[in-house]
Amino acid sequence: MLNITENQSLKQHNTFGIDVKARRFLQVTDEAALPELFASGALADGALLILGGGSNMLFTKDFEGLVIQIAIGGLEQQETADGDVLVTAGAGIVWNDFVQFAVNNDLAGAENLSLIPGTVGASPVQNIGAYGVELKDIFEDCRVFNLETGEFREFSNADCRFGYRDSIFKQELKGKVIITHVRFRLKRHAELNISYGAIGSELERRGITDPGIKDVAAVVSEIRVSKLPDPSTIGNAGSFFKNPVIEKYEFAEVVAKHPEVVHFATGDGRVKLAAGWLIEQCGWKGKVVGHTGTWKNQALVLVNHGGATGQEVYDLSSQIIESVKQTFGVELEREVNIL
Ligand code: FAD
Ligand code: EPU
């Protein structure tokens, strides 16, 4: 039986804490509900939104359609012949619970992605990444329900076409499929990635010369807590914009005027600029604008200081885009989904 409710508040379902409603709302805890939903005809009746933890969403108005909130559980591990471990997680598992499971079982690969909010099912959508690791580095495959055909199929790593904060699920399959399970390939023998500067310096500060999986997870968690606001007290969706990736000739123009610009080589001849730095240089860091603002320790994070509407946050983001464009000639792109 499908328990679709009406006029459901989404305030507890988005980390910005924006108070909007969904006209219809269904929580799915078992993938068997999806063929039933397809057969019911409810999917053909207006707009659809797939929702995990709502930590990459900005609602600017009520959602006049059906919100399908994915709460499918389950966490299983399986040894492979080559000594790796495949962990299958239901899409509704809280991302950090999966990471903790891996860390506590001495399985390497997920530790740099500690403390990222949201669900397992959303992790392939923007190929989540932090501290030198991306989801694609540990992703084996995922199971997907197609809302247009009513069929299940598996997507391999190559099928997902992962890029920086990008995948097929953000492009041609946007809103057309539901990820029900993700399978991760983790390593028994730790291959730690401590290349991100802040990890190395924090390990050194702690006097750790031969770090293990738990040390890296602990250090990443501490760095994150020091930089990012906790959505349970200050509404936010993490980085509001992507770090802009520009061509070499465009970079030459920026660096000629701003030699100190913070940048990183992407490996394909292009250059990634630190959006937080660009925004800070334009004077936005820690600025309060009505009920909104940018975070005092990370200018890339827009916050709800309490009572903000989604439109206010969106308007602030437009002002920031304009200001960075004027100063640096670089166009910021929003990372957060705007609804
Ligand atoms: P939602 O916000 O609910 O949805 C995000 C998108 O995925 C939407 O398009 C939605 O339709 C789609 N989606 C959700 N579930 C499914 C599903 N099962 N099947 C198909 N589509 C689905 N992100 C990073 O990459 N790195 C970070 O370091 C990081 N730090 C953050 C820090 C903070 C404090 C916050 C609040 C956010 C941060 N984020 C970060 C962003 C966010 O955590 C990720 O994008 C996360 O994967 C979103 O998960 P969610 O379940 O909340 O997805
Ligand atoms: N910086 C500033 N001022 C700021 C913020 C940053 O000058 O206000 C500079 C820093 O000093 C540093 C550089 O910008 O030199 C990069 O900063 P940081 O290491 O904090 O990372 P980021 O590029 O701002 C990205 C991701 C984060 C991820 C961190 C760690 C994007 C859009 N954001 O942020 O992901 O956690 O790296 O790997 O790629 C998210 O996607 O929601 C998110 C939080």
Image: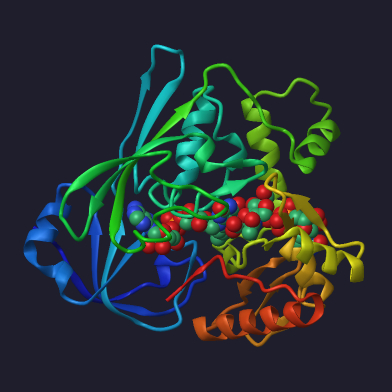
Judging depth in this view, the residue of 253 and 292 nearest the camera is 253
Question: How far from the left and from the top, in percent, is residue 140?
Answer: 41, 33
Question: How far from the left and from the top, in percent, is residue 161?
Answer: 45, 47
Question: How far from the left and from the top, in percent, is residue 209?
Answer: 80, 22
Judging depth in this view, the residue of 199 and 80 nearest the camera is 80
Seen at 41% across and 54% down, the residue is: 168
Seen at 59% across and 35% down, the residue is: 111
Q: Height in image: 334 above or below 148?
A: below
| Image quadrant assignment for residue 235 | bottom right
For the C terminus, the quadrant is bottom left
Q: Height in image: 172 above or below 143?
A: below
Judging depth in this view, the residue of 50 and 96 nearest the camera is 50
Seen at 52% across and 24% down, the residue is: 107
Seen at 31% across and 37% down, the residue is: 74
Q: In this view, does 144 lie to the left or right of 95?
A: left
For this orientation, the residue located farthest to the front is: 249
Question: How far from the left and from the top, in percent, is residue 225?
Answer: 68, 52
Q: In this view, does 94 lie to the left or right of 297?
A: left
